[in-house]
Amino acid sequence: MWSKECYLKVFTFGIIMFLTAGFFYMSAGLMGRGNDVAWHTLNGIQMIQSHHIIHTDVLTWKTFGHAWSNPEWLFDVLVGATYLKFGWFGIRLLVVLFGELLMIVLVSYAIPRQKRSTIIIFSIIVAFNLVPYYTARPQIVSFVMFALSIYLIEIARRDGWGKLLWFIPAFIFWNNAHGSAILFLGLLGLEWFEDHKVWPYIMGFVLLLAVRLGNPFELVHFVYGQLSPVTLSISEFRSPDFHSPQALLMLSYFAVSCLLVISKTSPREKAWLILGWLAYFISIRFGAYAAFLTWFIVMKHLDLKPLRFNVMPILATFLVVLFICKSLLFWRSPFYEPIESGAAQYCVQHGIKDVVNEYGIGGVLEWYGLKTIADGRGLWVGEKWFSVSVYFDTESGKYPMKKFLEEEAPSIKAVIWLDNTPVALQMNLLQEWNKVYDNASVSVWTKS
């Protein structure tokens, strides 16, 4: 027979899973099949249909046949297979599944260490902070694996570093699904400062980075692309906008957590906090990882016993009731239809195949069968046309669109770009180009 405490733990788990599933379902719908989701899915479908891992660019006209690392091929195959079997709704549920796997890891660590009300409150805060990150992109695999690796390191520190060997299959999966598996080595590197016995395991996992079903040196190109100055022209690589509500919520989570536990943390845990949040302040894409590091530290050290009146149960009850009431809205939230879909359909209907386009909308255009100039990937890093001073300065209006078209796309007869941007304003002034489609968000110009 289960004890009352066991039933309460299961109830806590259930409440957290139900509430956070709504968050992740809503989050998956916010981007829908827009941005990178479309080309990841298309890449997976093409690999399934061709029965091999694609290592060249087959999506753009600009660099068709260009070598491509395809570092996230395994995730793309997963979403491609999901789409072929269950459509976009299946992909949305796949996002929820990975979100729930993450919460299982986080809550499993917390339940033996914290009171139920504390876990519920922090679960809601963390899940709400993750809403901008949870779309059908390979980072959702990385989130689960990163949290799992922290949990495993905690176990290995107590029971011996040999426990890390259990992580080898997960590490190989992670390494083929997202290029962030190297973060695990960073965590182990911090352990080395406190226990040199971890060194052989660090070297072992360094060697495992080469276990990729393809060229083992692909990761070098991928990491090089992530460190290129070009990435600073892409919004998700920039530092957070601390005027936005989401960034302020994330910052508040960090500040409150530090105030509650910083005096009890070890030097290694302080390094976790400093490095994790410094990475977030540099690039918004690291916010989720900083949140996970903070979670494990808070769940390990938080002690509210000195408080005369603990408001946590009251606050937890309020949040649960509030979000249960809102859950219907989460589960009824729409699946975003990209604003560029109409422009893509127009081009298909009028026989337009090759286009010059804005970076962020390329994936959706490719989904409809168009060949683009760029699509959200970074395989062109190092090429002159894709540099900050050419393509991205064209986007910002610093480089003339007319000159870009003449030099980089002289044979292309169509441009698809977002309205009310420097490029759109220039296109409207070019006499040889005519606007043939405009849905007040995205326009199409063709060359006469």
Image (cartoon, grey):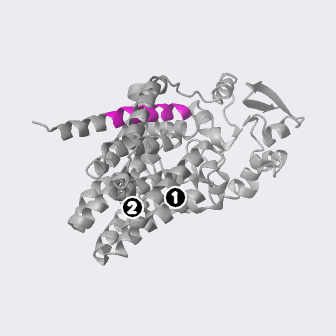
| Labels 1 and 2: the sequence-earlier one | 2
- Viewer-nearest residue: 185 or 16: 16
Is 48 on the left-hand or right-hand side of 338? left
- Tag shown at residue 184: 2
Is 75 on the left-hand or right-hand side of 104? right
Residue lying farthest to the front in this orientation: 308
**Badge 2 element:** helix
Residue at mark 1 to residue at mark 2: CA–CA distance: 17 Å
Instruction: Answer with the quarter of the image where residue 278 lies.
Output: bottom right
Residue drawn 75% across the image and 30% down it: 443
Residue drawn 36% across the image and 67% down it: 188
**Residue denoted by label 1:** 222
Residue 406 at x, y percent in the picture: 81, 47
Residue 250 at x, y percent in the picture: 53, 49
Residue 356 lies, with reference to residue 200, above or below; the image says above
The amino acid type, in three-letter code, at marker 1 is Phe
Residue 125 lies, with reference to residue 19, above or below; the image says below
